[in-house]
Amino acid sequence: MSEMTVAQRAGAEIAVDRAPFFPRKKKTITGRSIAVLILLTICALFFCIPLYVVVVTSFKTMDQIREGAMFALPNVWTLEAWDHAWNSACSGINCNGLKVGFWNSVAILFPSLILSIGISMITGYALALWNVRWAGAFLFILFICAFVPFQIIMFPLITMTATLKIYGSLWGVAVIHAVLAMPVLTLIFRNYYKDIPQEIMSAAVMDSGSFWNIFTEIILPMSGNILIVVLILQITSIWNDYLIGVTFGGMNGQPMTVNLANLITISTGTTRYNDNMAAALLTAIPPLVIYFFVGKLFVQGITAGAIKG
């Protein structure tokens, strides 16, 4: 045993000694690299300079803002504007801050995600892997509905939600978000599932797999990539929406974006720019946090073929 070990070690040493050597090429800066760096720097500044102004202004006092030094750092860093925007900023006649709109947005977000993704996933699975009658006509209708502007069907949707007694509530906004997202999401799920090999479905059916058993035991575990992509798309779309919230939310169901718009556009006396900037950042933070944590998975989902066709 010990002789074999010695032989193996000797063989390994010989193999290491004979391993090919590939010297690294020295990195040289070419004109093309300089041009790319300059272009990337300009693009970064284009997006970062306005964001820098928003961030530093939110930490300034109004006395320093009146001096006009837009790009200067705050003389005294203060969270007064953030506290005022969150707790006591006025949106119309209500001065309860953005926290009310934040929790409204959270209450709208979860039922919208569950309704839109759940129904679209099952519909896409059925259209892609089961022999559904009139599937072609149904897909054509979905394709048409996916590109109908919301403004065209706004009045019929108001009538429908009023008939269902959900107009002017959080559930009204959530249901409208789910309904409007279903055509696009169904097409995305259908295009993703149609590439699943038919052999897998045939074997599952032969094992007496029913529609729901196959969905829960085979399809759902294979949907990780597309679920990440769809979740990020839906969270961003629902959280940043303004038009649906202001139309269907009523007085008590307005999301955070509507409160932000009211805070900035409806004001009396001196405009408090630090409050406005802090309110804008508070509204933008949730989607940014989600991108920060799952952005890598989002890219992986797209490259894995979640959105195609």
Image (cartoon, rainbow, N blue to C red):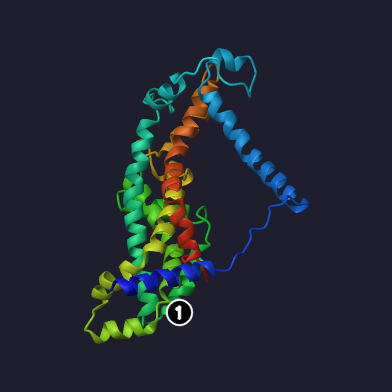
At 41% from the left and 47% from the top, the residue drawn is 293
Does the rendering let one see residue 164?
Answer: yes
At 55% from the left and 20% from the top, the residue drawn is 271
Residue 104: image location, x then y, percent: 35, 39
Q: Work out whether residue 176 or residue 129 is closer to the camera in this orientation and state it.
A: 129
**Vertical placement of residue 171 versus 271, above or below:** below
How many callouts does the rendering have?
Answer: 1
Residue at the disc numbered 1: 136
Residue 268: image location, x then y, percent: 52, 19
**Vertical placement of residue 133 versus 28, above or below:** below
Q: Quadrant of residue 113?
A: bottom left
Q: Work out whether residue 148 or residue 181 is closer to the camera in this orientation and state it.
A: 181
> In which quadrant will I find the N terminus?
bottom left
- The three-letter amino acid code for the residue at tag 1 is Gly
Under tag 1, what secondary structure? helix
Q: Work out whether residue 166 or residue 301 is closer to the camera in this orientation and state it.
A: 301
